[in-house]
Image (cartoon, rainbow, N blue to C red):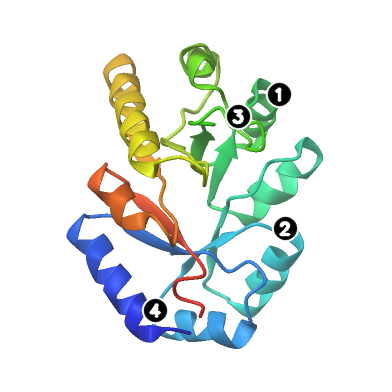
Amino acid sequence: MDIKALEEISNLAEKYSAQLLPVIKDKKFEDIKKLYDLGYREFGENRLEQLLDHKIKLKEGKFHFIAPLQSRKITEIMDNCISIHTLSRNKEAKAINKIYTNHRIFVQINIDNDPNKSGLRVNEVDEFFTYFEELSYFPVGIMCIPSLEKDPKIAFSNMHKINEKIKNNYKNYTGGLSMGMSDDYKIALDYGATIIRIGSKIFK
């Protein structure tokens, strides 16, 4: 683990009033435990099986699910997570509605219209958000994973604009922005990220 990098990223996130969310997929438990012992309690998880194991070992740990959703696993994910960052289909939104209890739900946007990425196309965002007027909860924010082949500044700038539009259209929308990873988190913070999801940069 790179403690120096952890401190630098944590301090920068704090400067921007953002949250550093350590992503612990496939990481050594001894390193995850170091983070826990340093006071970190919220973690990003990609795999439900690992999440369940970590939840047993980290008694006060709270988990964000950041992998593509599978409808058949939503109940188990909701039972064991405080947040989901990857909602993008009406079917899943409806399933979440049945068991929702103050979870923080982010809608994933395929900001570059990348065929290899999950999430809503940009032109689908407005229609998708109107669906929540029929449900008992409302997303707290939006999330993206920019294409590696494109300039992240463009993606994050577009996310910021979409986020502002949603805030203007829905007064109960709080405007969270889950964006930025190890290679581009500084840029994401400049464009308003409220959560940066960091794995490799701190688990060297």
Mark 3 vs 2, N-terminal side: 2
Mark 4 vs 2, N-terminal side: 4
> In the figure, is residue 8 to the left or right of 101?
left
Mark 3 vs 4, N-terminal side: 4
Q: CA distance from mark 3 to mark 2?
A: 18 Å
Q: Are marks 4 and 1 in contact (CB under 8 Å)?
A: no
Element marked by disc 4: loop
Locate residue 7: give its quadrant.
bottom left
> In the figure, is residue 188 to the left or right of 22?
left
Tell me the kind of residue under disc 4: Gly
Seen as rendered, the residue at the extreme right is: 72
What residue is drawn where x is 49% and y is 21%?
A: 122
The residue beneath circle 4 is 39
Tell us which disc is closer to us: 3 or 4.
3
The residue beneath circle 3 is 88
Tell me the kind of residue under disc 1: Lys
Element marked by disc 3: loop
Residue 48: mark: 2
Q: CA distance from mark 2 to mark 1?
A: 20 Å
Locate residue 84: give its quadrant.
top right
Q: CA distance from mark 3 to mark 4?
A: 32 Å
Mark 4 vs 1, N-terminal side: 4
Q: CA distance from mark 4 to mark 2?
A: 23 Å
Q: CA distance from mark 4 to mark 1?
A: 37 Å
What residue is drawn where x is 37% and y is 32%?
A: 159
Tell us which disc is closer to us: 3 or 2.
3
Q: CA distance from mark 1 to mark 3?
A: 9 Å
Tell us which disc is closer to us: 1 or 3.
3
